[in-house]
Amino acid sequence: MTIWILNHHALTPQMSGGTRHYDFARELIKRGHKVAIISSSFHYSKYTEMKEYEGKEHICEYVDGIEWVWIKTPPYRGNGVARVKNMLSYTNKVLRIVPKLDLSKPDIIIGSSVHLFAAYAAYRLSQKYKTPFIMEVRDLWPQTLIDMGISKRHPFIIVLGILERFLYRKADKIISNLPYAYEYISAYAPAEKFEWISNGVDLSNIPYKEKSKSSPFVVSYTGAIGVANNLGILVEAADKLKEDKNIIFRIIGDGAEKQKLKEMVKIKGLTNITIEDPVVKNQIPDILAASDILYFNLKDSPVFRYGISSNKLFDYMAAGRVIIFSTNAANNPIKEANGGFTIAPDDIDALTDTMKQILSMSHEDRVQMGKRNREYCEKFYSIKVLTNKLEKVLHDEVSDA
């Protein structure tokens, strides 16, 4: 099959961020398929342009066998009008530019949220090329925006709601990385349209390395530093445990809250925690391997009632380390794997008590707990296993077309 994937925010491993579609594309290509990814190169969390266009509106290149089309979109910061302009620019340019390119004609087209305008562009292209249209839901817009506090009567929310219902009707298949998304989508689409395909991890990129008993004891967080991640609580934990010279904390990443965290560390005079710049994805395994505890926190929010599907969490599991998962999400792979500890979001006492508990465990018990994460990931969340599901969905839709 020739497969087109429209994902406004698709990234390569060199760009620091989620690589769901890169990983799927690489595995599909190994199986004999052709894949094109059409995305923007303006980074969604760094708020910076990742490509040089030299006056052009797009760039075409091959990335590890993937036909990749980069669309130049205007810059923005935060979630205001400029971001909406960026979304609409991507959609308009895709519809104008892509049909003029010398891409292999698609057998099937996937349109992936976050925003619905990218999925709409995929639908329009599917009509032009007379192919099945797969809608991928990675964020339940507009419901997520409503959960974040935007009024459901806001004109933009009303427009998104109309577009959402239209796309659910028109999609030949709806896939989501959120395990309980269908509880929401079922109001608009029949059960046979829906398929859960989680995010996952390419295990070949994160080889398992057993942690030595060496000191100090390292607690690490890697990834976005935003409001939803609520990493101030990790700084508070570092403050509470600063007398224990055997434990250090690392936060590696970027985002809107990074400077605030740096100021917290400076005001508290902490020397046992570092706030570090993001690294490219192929450097992440070494950071995870050098850690004893991997920390993942999500701020208490109704947004997560349909579950989460975090690339970062599966990277943590693949590394085979003890994980502290602070969440109220509907699903919990760490609990299922018995590979760590789950605590309530924003509970500083529970966090520090759990860290002390892990410190008191024997090295062998920590190793075995971490290995359970790796084994569970191999069984359910490897890219090979997940691509089996995706490939079947695509094959079935193409066969029925």
Image: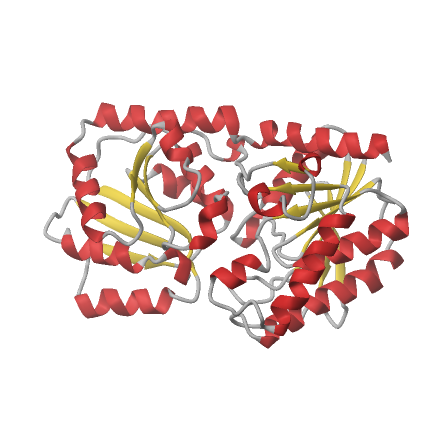
Q: In terms of depth relative to the viewer, which is nearer, 314 or 69?
A: 314
Horizontally, is 212 left or right of 278 in the view?
left
Task: Give the residue at x 68% y 56%.
Answer: 164
Considering depth in this image, is 367 or 145 the residue closer to the camera? 145
Q: Which residue occupies 75% across, 34% down?
A: 394
Position in image of residue 378 (x %, y %)? 49, 25
Asked where in the image residue 26 lies, by quadrant, the reply is top right
Q: Quadrant of the N terminus?
A: top right
User: Image quarter for residue 261?
Assistant: bottom left
In the rendered image of this protein, does residue 152 appear above or below residue 353? below
Q: Position of residue 169 (x, y in %)?
A: 75, 49
Q: Is residue 192 above or below residue 306?
A: above
Q: In the rendered view, how is the structure colored?
A: secondary structure
The image shows a total of numbered marks equal to: 0
Q: Residue at x 64, y 38 (%)?
A: 24
Residue 69 can be seen, yes or no? no
- How far from the left and from the top, in percent, is residue 119? 71, 54
Task: Judge by depth and name the residue closer to the eye, 161 or 22.
Answer: 161
User: Does residue 125 lie above or below 82 as drawn?
Assistant: above
Q: Residue furthest bottom?
A: 81
Residue ranking furthest to the left: 243
Q: Measuring from the top left, give residue 129's x and y in whole percent.
A: 89, 48
Q: Residue at x 24, y 64 (%)?
A: 265
Position of the C terminus by quadrant: top right
The reply to whether residue 115 is visible in this rendering is yes
Q: Who is closer to the viewer here, 254 or 147?
A: 147
Q: Is residue 145 left or right of residue 260?
A: right
